[in-house]
Amino acid sequence: MRHIASTRLGLFLLPFLIAIVFAFVTQHVWEDYYITWRSSKNLATGQGLVYHAGEKLHTFTSPLGVLLPAAASLTTFNASDAAALWLFRLLSAAVLGVTALILWSLAQRLAYARLAAILLIGWLALDSKIIDFSINGMETAFLVLFLTWTLHAHFNRTEHAWKHLGLAWAGLMWTRPDSFIYIGLLAAGCWLFNEPLRSGRGRRQLFTLYLKAGLVTTAVYLPWLLFAWGYYGTPVPHTITAKSGFGDPHTLTGLVETILRLPMNMWAGSGSIHATFLPAYHQFGGWPEVLVQCARAVAATIALLWVLPFLRMETRAASFAFFGAHVYLSYYPYFPFPWYLPATTLLAVFSAGGLLAQLLSAAAKWEHHYPATNRNRQILGFALTIVTVALVANAWLTWQSGRLFAAQQKIVEDGNRRKIGEWLKANSQPDDTVFMEPLGYIGYFSGLKTYDMPGLSSREVVEARQRVGNGWEKVIAELKPRWLVLRPHEAEGLQKASYDLLKTEYLFAREFSVQDQLAGLDVPGLPYLKHDARFLVYERQSAHGGAELLQDQSAFPISRITIEDRELTFAHAPSVLVRHLPRSARTFTVRFGFAPDAYADPADHTDGATFTVELVDDGQTHRLASRTLEPATNPADRGLQQFTLDLPPRGEGARLLLRASPYRSISKDWTCWGDGEFE
């Protein structure tokens, strides 16, 4: 008994301690946690289960994912966000420990060899996505727990099996409402590939089991559905509604094509299946190609095990569910986000464990029938090598992911996105609105009314998309938010779609960049961090918009400076200088360039700026000339440059805008303009 107790304690502590150490080292808090946490905290503080106080909108997906953090906050008397998060982390880590116990029990029930059970437990404890999404504020630990319980219940031969299966299914639905996909796939797989000697039931008995379990699931999950329907007016989370409307319409034909093409596509790396064993957002690059290809090959192989009739039912059922889950993730979501994948990883590992257990069982029988051969030892040695390599590679990926996430948390999340939210809160009015794509940190720490894309927190954004389409420029023009928070490529896309939007209606307010801090990092997956390393904040102008811009604008003080014996206006980019046009003027000549100190120091210099002359006439903006100067790298761009422009016919009150825009960063963008001469 003491040996059994110590084994169980070790099984529990292994994933529990790994998860806690991972959380302590990385301090990682996932972006989406703060989307849910804002609703959790509003509930805990008596403002309702809402993202925006007074606005009943179902802005979260997981009931457990929002209610448990709220309970943690109440436990701390709503005094500490950090303490509440750590309580949730401890609970999630403990749930992983319980999952390990259930998985070990299942392996014993199925008479798996010790090595196969070690593979199951080892992968659970070491998988980077399972560990990270269990401690970074997501509900993944509970998803993995209830999915493991579901597997266990399918092979429970007692008369209470239907209760276990029903409660496990209900737990899945309370964790994620799309869990009915996994419930149905596993049930279908176990029914299709049923072996009465392993399940203890025939297909008719399985059908009865599922029916009774479904009644339990309905009884346990129905209260939440009724609450959501009554409170929000719909049981469907708004997050699901917001994510719809992207890509081609979903049809039965499209689903069938996805099923038929998946075996070929998964070898090519398209869809979601290749990401099963890889770190979150590995698509950005920076990971060893050999590991990427090996992970892809293993996932693709496991996805097709269900077609092999000589394999055991649990191996085929898990493989079938794994394949079907990736059909769903490859076709329905507009992107297979990494927090969707831990459930599929568990299915894949369980299928692989079943395959290994069957191989070891066959080897043992071979030794029994042919005692003189060493084939069993060869197979065992081969299997031991494969398991060791797999677990070591998995541990290495998790270690490197931990390094990556520690840097992400310190530099990108706390050092950039959180600061954007705090800056907005300090520089805005309570009734201001902000538009952005990354809702979590910026939305929570700004406390503002958010218009996020695609509208996870905003009914207005979804309705605007339905009216004008998914184009950002159209949604912004429709909703007119006070603030825009954009990545550089998003700002560039807006300028291409609607040139005037960021030129006249919105003006640059501030840049937030941690690119320099990332430049010296040596971690795999670094391109993923660079995606959120730089943001540009724009502020909407007065009711008349930028078309009424009558004064010089700059985020920095404007002064006068002498260069090459000429007096110029010194206006650090980004800036706009206004020149009113004499009606009789036909040409305009203006000098421009950088102050020499901007590029004199080889170690600290500007990376360039774009100088643009625009004509504003009757509310319309026309670009007359534009040139990018990079004086630090191109000697021809040093000193004063000159535009000589022919002016088109225009109306009364037309004016010129002399605009200087940063090239990549705003560091030392000491740009200057002459007064200009009209003829």
Image (cartoon, rainbow, N blue to C red):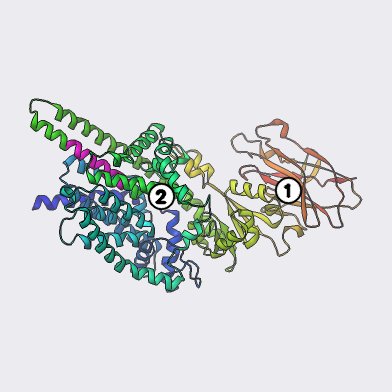
Give, as a single range, the part of the protein colored magenta.
345-360
**Which x, y percent locates residue 14?**
24, 48
Which SS does the magenta portion mostly show? helix
Identity, as a three-letter code, of the amino acid under mark 2: Tyr
Image quadrant where residue 181 sits: bottom left
Are the residues flagged by discs 1 and 2 in contact, CB closer than 8 Å? Answer: no
Label drawn at residue 659:
1
Q: Is residue 359 magenta?
A: yes
Residue 231 is left or right of residue 637, and the answer is left
Image height of 643 relative to 484, above or below:
above
Residue situated in front as seen by the camera: 106 or 15? 106
Tell me the residue at 48%/67% (across/down).
57
Disc 1 or 2, which lies upstream in sequence? 2
Image coords of residue 85 (percent x, y): 37, 60
Callout 2 secondary element: helix
Q: Which residue is at the front of the view, 548 or 381? A: 381
- Marks counted in the figure total 2
- Could you say which disc has been placed on residue 328 in the image? 2
